[in-house]
Image: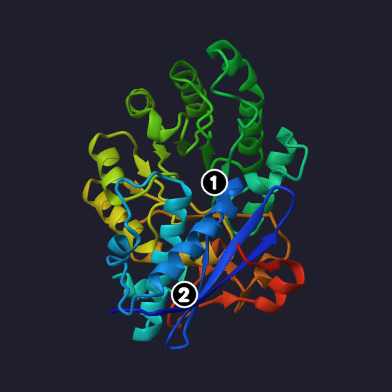
Amino acid sequence: MAIKFNEIKFYYLKANQFTTWFFASISDDKGFIVDVEFTNGALSSEVAILLSEMFHVIKKSNNITEKSIFPVLDIKHPVIGRSPTATALSAIRSGILQLESLHKGIPLGEHLGGSFKDRVPLYANINRGLFLTDRTPKSFATAATQAVAKGFKIIKCAPFDEVSSDYSTEDILSSAQYGLQRVKEIRDSIGSNIDILIDCHGRFDLPAALVIAEKLEKLSVSWFEEPLETEDHFGSLVEVKNNTSIPIAGGESMYGLSAFTELLEKGVLDIVMPDLKYCGGASEAVKIGKVAMQLNKGYSIHSPSGPVSLLLSAHTTSAVLGAMPLEHAVHEYPLRDAILTPSELIKNGNLIIPNTPGLGGRLNLDFIRKYGFEFSP
């Protein structure tokens, strides 16, 4: 199915002093409009410029498909993960898929090859909301307890964000002790029936990662995410994986099926975590998920993002049989459910997916213009 682009508009919404979400609305010549998120931290403005340039090149073509944009844009492989190019490409590809599903009149998850599911299980990432607190062990425990009270049965936190891989191993281990206290406080508060996932943001070296993994085993955590940066430490991650009973997760910054396939075939991770904003979009993430299933690996989409990205990730999760729960950043923005129309709906730790064509939600532009901004890159 070929698409002809018509117009693109850009918006951003500052959720708090740490988080700003960036969105684009894309229309085609049939009058359909879809929304994508292209948030990439400090690179988001650069992504917006590149996305606008790509759009206007593609707009000159009458028969656009996901595959055809690569020669049109003269994209060279491999694409570097989490780069502006990866982020802009992922947004355009996911926009094309949404438009195709609207043309077909079916939910996006079905267009991606799945059967419609009205809900997808989530896990609660409490870390982004904790940026607004003193980040004491008690604050971590309180945030976890609040998420459990809302029906979440899996909690993720990043307790080691004061640690740096540039430190000596001795200093890494010393500075990680406060993070271990946070995890223990969470475990003591929520009990043994709730899973705890630990995200390390690549802050350890190999010797420290091995020590911390042993200590986390005693706290019964359910995964150990990126103790070292995935892209740069295949060998070290294999060693960590071979010396702990905790599943090793990661890959959030990587782009493309081939990169994830190499990762999986080399046995680097137990669980892969593509992020739709960076990995190539929804269809690429489905391909990655199916390879993970074939190799008996775990698959959980990385999505500590805004509601557009979460809903897109939910459709993608629903299209991969055997996918693990999807990430959701809780407690970050109190007006979050008003960003989309219909409103984002989360019940008992599940995201409810509207049974309508396409994504099932649009940016509430009245809200965005009141609390955010429309801009030109």
Q: Position of residue 100 (x, y in %)?
A: 36, 78
Q: CA distance from mark 1 to mark 2?
A: 31 Å
* Residue positioned most to the bottom: 30
Q: Is residue 272 left or right of residue 370?
A: left
Residue appearing at x 46%, y 46% in the figure: 82
In this view, the residue in front, 130 or 364, is: 364
Quarter of the picture holding the N terminus: bottom left
Q: Is residue 143 left or right of residue 102?
A: right
Picture quadrant where residue 89 is located: bottom left
Q: Position of residue 363 (x, y in %)?
A: 60, 74
**Residue under label 1:** 194
Kindly tell me whether residue 124 is visible in this rendering.
no
Quarter of the picture holding the C terminus: bottom right
In the rendered image, the vertical position of residue 8 relative to residue 267, given as above or below: below
Q: In this rendering, which labeled residue sits more in front, label 1 or label 2?
A: 2
Circle 1 sits in a helix, a strand or a loop, which is it?
loop
In this view, the residue in front, 352 or 43, is: 43
Q: Is residue 256 left or right of residue 169?
A: left
Residue 104 disc label: none
Q: Position of residue 53 (x, y in %)?
A: 48, 63
Q: Position of residue 203 (x, y in %)?
A: 54, 28
Residue 359 disc label: 2
Circle 2 sits in a helix, a strand or a loop, which is it?
loop
Residue appearing at x 42%, y 88% in the figure: 30
Q: Are marks 1 and 2 in contact (CB under 8 Å)?
A: no
Kindly tell me whether residue 177 is visible in this rendering.
yes
Query: What number of labels is visible?
Result: 2
Residue appearing at x 44%, y 45% in the figure: 252
